[in-house]
Image (spheres, rainbow, N blue to C red):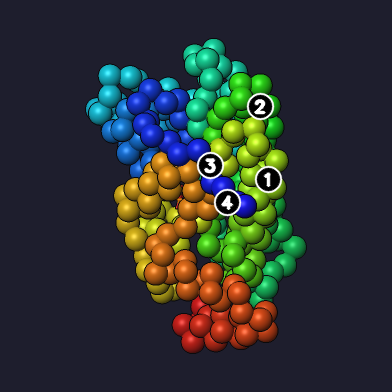
Amino acid sequence: MFFSSNPPIHSWKNKIVWIIGASSGIGAALASLLAQNGAHLVLSARSVDKLNDVARTCDAFSTFHSLILPCDIHSEEEIHSTYQKIKQQHHAIDLVIIASGTYDALSIREFNPQQLSTVINTIDTNLTGYYRVISYVIPDFLKNGKGGLAMISSVAGFSGLPNALAYAPTKAALNNLAEGLYAELHPHQIGIYIVCPGFVATPMTANNRFPMPALIEVDQAAQAIISGLEKGQFEIHFPKRFTLFLQFLRRLPRSWYIKIISYFFHKNSIL
Ligand SMILES: NC(=O)c1ccc[n+]([C@@H]2O[C@H](COP(=O)([O-])OP(=O)(O)OC[C@H]3O[C@@H](n4cnc5c(N)ncnc54)[C@H](OP(=O)(O)O)[C@@H]3O)[C@@H](O)[C@H]2O)c1
């Protein structure tokens, strides 16, 4: 096949998995499911208390104690020291999952110089921070001749979206980055996975005041991600009833796409 996929993951038993953004939502649900499947976890995010809660849930399924290493993805120094601590404990990481993210609605109608800080924070959390992690883990993956990197992007990265003018471009960039990484790293047996969820019920979406079509529970999202990883899928997107429709819209002529999407947003008074 021209575009073969990543090697399948047959078992999670004793696999070392570092989850960044493990303190809530999708990252926390993934941690719990992976612990149930026998993985050994390293859990990172900024909120120590929440990480402790997640670790308690995970450790109930396992004889292995999750390693809690709080860090802020904005800080190169913290990523560096966290990674050194992981290397002291574990010979090699099998999979890094970057799930950290932030979302603030942003419409051009409210945009002014004060809002630049929101844009900068979103880019740093959702994109630049991912590069910080990649800069440490990929060289070791190459040295070891194995490893996998899963990045949680979004369907918001498929095409331009109104009212998501900071968030959606970071996810589009992640989708693009994953394609480049895959092309370079696939011959080296390094797995690259890009995860594009639709709407998932997590703290991030809890305050959304607009309709969220095909909203799913966080455990369903975690299950879909694990299943995609096990199959070695490069792009893991779900729920299909929503993502396939968006992929269809993406293939339409641009002017049609923009008309349809702006009709939907105006009809639902999102703008
Ligand atoms: N929920 C959805 O509908 C949906 C849809 C598509 C994609 N996604 C993506 O899925 C990922 C997880 O989102 P979620 O819905 O699970 O939201 P969430 O519950 O708000 O989780 C976000 C996670 O990111 C961490 N985080 C935020 N800023 C960080 C920083 N500076 N350094 C380290 N960690 C940081 C948070 O931990 P701390 O605050 O403790 O640091 C938390 O663990 C995000 O990338 C999001 O864009 C979500």
State the SS at label 3: loop
Q: Which residue is mark 1?
A: 183
Q: Is residue 216 visible?
A: yes
Distance from label 3 to label 4 (Cα)? 12 Å
The residue that appears at 50% across and 38% down in the rendered structure is 7
Q: Which mark is residue 1?
A: 4
Residue topped by disc 2: 142
- The image shows residue 43, relative to residue 88, as above or below, that is below
Q: Looking at numbered disc 2 in the image, what kind of residue is underneath it? A: Leu
Give how far across and how far down residue 171 sits, in percent. Answer: 61, 56
Q: Earlier in the sequence, mark 4 or mark 2?
A: 4
The quarter holding residue 56 reads: top left
Which of 258 and 71 lies nearest the eye of the viewer? 258
Pointer 1 with pointer 3, Cβ within 8 A:
no
Q: Mark 1 near ligand 1 (CB under 8 Å)?
A: no
Q: Amino acid at mark 3?
A: Asn
**Which residue is farthest top?**
88
Please name the residue shown 62% across and 68% down the image: 159
The amino acid marked with disc number 4 is Met
Mark positioned earlier in the residue sequence (3 or 2):
3
Q: Nearer the viewer, mark 3 or mark 2?
A: 3
